[in-house]
Image (cartoon, helix red, strand yellow):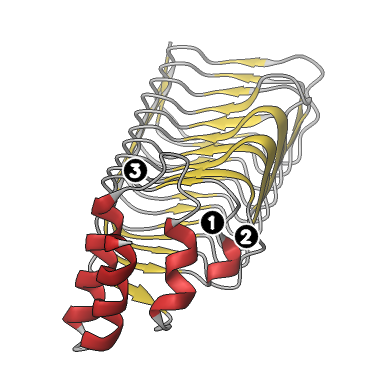
Amino acid sequence: MEIRHPVRLTSCHLQDSLELDGAQTRQLDLSGSHLSALAATSLRVDGALRLTGCQISGNVRLSNAEISSGIFLEGARLGSGRGWALELDHASVGADVRAPRLVALGGLHLGTARVEGAVDLEDARIENADGDALDAARLTVGTVLNAGGLTAEGRVRLTGARVAGWISFIEAELSNPGGVALGISSCEAAQLTLRDAQPVVGDVRMHYSTFKVIEAEPQVWPATVRLDGLTYEALTPRLPAADRLALLQRDADGFVPHSYEQLAASYRRVGDDVDARAVQLAEQR
């Protein structure tokens, strides 16, 4: 179905789901509307898709969609608590995905999506305690992934993601008791920051990821981590080696020489030979 004009259905109440699978239009604006669900697999929008302030009691299916000028979900409320609240897997977005203050009762599925701009989840809340809160495996982001202030119940999965700028979990609360809370293995980004984040509840897996800078206080990390193959240039804030070594000793894989070598190298880069030697001595022990 091709709609040759912009579609605007703002502040509407639709009792049934809106079915737009395979449709093509110039713009789609549903801001402020109430829907039972949005089925728009393989949707093509030559402009923007606006769901700002929407109340959608079911799920939003945008798998394989092509959106030229961004997706706007500011202050929206999605999902019923069962399954995915938002499916954006294998989608292509020519600008940003903006979802600050989003409330999702169910997970967000962004696996293998490509976003040319930023993904903004600032102050969002995602509740999917029995599964993935955010599945962004193999996601590609052209600028930044901002999850500052995010509250996530369930696993946050960024396995294999590629982010040109930074990944931010500033002041975030990540919780998945008894499972992986943050799975960020084989990921690449310029910077990973968990500044002022709450202590992660659940395991963290970061093996074989690459960052230029990792910013986190030691108390952010949980009792179990996996760090083998993790590569970075610098850690901030700058702390004595004793404050960083405790994390390496909590690796679920046991003694991982690569982790000690990376930590020692980060101290040598800033000319701190004393702490570099302290790390090497700890490795030898």
Whichever of callouts 2 and 3 sits on the residue coming sooner in the sequence is 2
Q: Which mark is residue 207?
A: 3
Q: Which residue does the numbered mark 1 point to in the structure image?
A: 147
Q: Which mark is residue 133?
A: none
Residue at image coords 67%, 19% = 83
Are the residues flagged by discs 2 and 1 in contact, CB closer than 8 Å?
yes
Q: Amino acid at mark 2?
A: Ala
80 left or right of 49? right
Q: Nearer the viewer, mark 2 or mark 1?
A: 2
Residue 120 % position (x, y): 50, 54
Q: Nearer the viewer, mark 3 or mark 1?
A: 3
Whichever of callouts 2 and 1 sits on the residue coming sooner in the sequence is 1
188 left or right of 71? left
Q: How busy is the neighbourhood of tag 1: few (under 14 within 10 Å), some, or many (20 plus)?
A: many
Q: Secondary structure at mark 1?
A: loop
Q: Secondary structure at mark 2?
A: loop
Q: Which residue does the numbered mark 2 point to in the structure image?
A: 172
